[in-house]
Amino acid sequence: MSIYRLMGLGLGLVALCSLPTAAKAEAPKFEYAKKEEAKAEGKATAKTASAEWKATAQAGFLLTTGNASNTTVSSGFRASRKAGKNKLQLDLGGAFARSTIYLAVDDNANGAIEESELNRIAKTTSQSWLVKGRYDRFLNAHNALYISAATSADKPAGRVLIGSGQVGYSRILVDSKVHQLVLESGYDFSYEDLSGNTKSVSIHSWRIFAGYRGKLSEDTSLEISTESLFNINELETSSGPVSPFLDTRFNNQVSLTTSIYGDLSFRFSFQSRFDNNPAPRPKLEVPYAGGFSPLADKLDTRTEAAIIVNFL
């Protein structure tokens, strides 16, 4: 073999050996932070993360005059703050309705209504309000402990003032972009100041709650909730003693919310409240006969259409 062939073979080997080195030099590089640096960065992000605030207000109004005179007003406000494992929520709500009707009374019993026997009377048919605060302590992403306190009133239903407190456990069973299902169980205490000369009532209850929220479309959502309260103590009422689990109460709500424009939405909702042992009816201008104390209806319903504004 000549010297030239040896030189050519050597140059070829050098070029062949240099190919992998050139390929490595041109390959893209990916830099990863060290484990300690990643932890430090995560802690800094957690410390600087801001709290999540939400606030909404809703209002509904109806006014008619003339032959039929009605005034109906409903309003609500909700604000919440969530930071880390803590969440605070405040709820305010109220409803007022007043109607004017014609009342005919045949005072002289002649079988006909005269001009002086036709009266126009205004009556308040709905008057209720609610103030409620709640605190949730999240144990992890799906489990939490809660405590709440509320005060409310519903005069047409015979409840001048209601004070209540709740404590219990909350569990998120389903949590996705489309569906969310929550179950809660705990203890409820309610103090009811009733109308008339009826004694106030203290109720200790077992509470069960289920709530569902689903997205029907990008702009429309559906919410369904039901709350059940089962008294665990015997009650002394104006109609006699009530044994445990016989003063059952159910509070249900279905609402459909759709976005109109920006932070403006429209909500249609239906609420029902059932009380197996209702309070006595409020007093009338003419007193009830001795020994007669009528009770309020067991079922109250409320259908509402309202405009909602999202502030945060």
Image: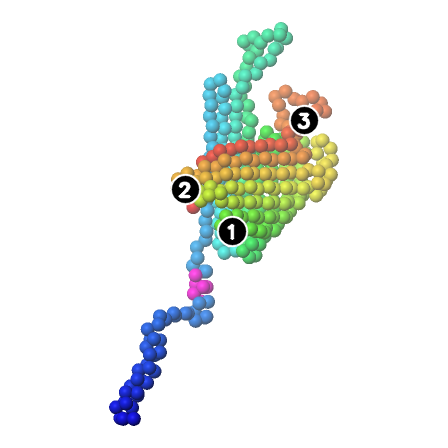
Please state the horizontal and vertical placement of residue 1, each as a whole percent of the image. 29, 93
Three-letter residue code for mark 1: Ser
CB-based contact (under 8 Å), mark 2 and mark 3: no
| Residue appearing at x 63%, y 38% in the figure | 250
User: Tag 3 or tag 1, which sits nearer the N-term?
Assistant: 1
**Residue drawn at point x = 55 percent, y = 38 percent:** 254
Observer-side mark, 1 or 3, equals: 1
Q: Is residue 147 visible?
A: no
Count residues near mark 1 (Cα–Cα under 10 Å), then give few for <14, some for 14-19, many for 20+: few
Label 2 secondary element: loop
Q: Determine the secondary structure under disc 3.
A: loop
Marks 2 and 3, Cα distance to the nearest angstrom? 46 Å
Residue 81 place in picture, x, y as percent: 48, 49
Name which residue type carries label 2: Asp
Q: Mark 3 points at which residue?
A: 294
Which is in the foreground here, disc 2 or disc 3? 2
- Tell me the kind of residue under disc 3: Pro
Q: Name the residue under label 1.
A: 176
Image: 193 above or below 111: below
Q: In the image shown, does 25 or 223 lie closer to the viewer? A: 25
* Circle 2 residue: 263
- State the image coordinates of residue 253 (x, y, percent, origin top left): 56, 38
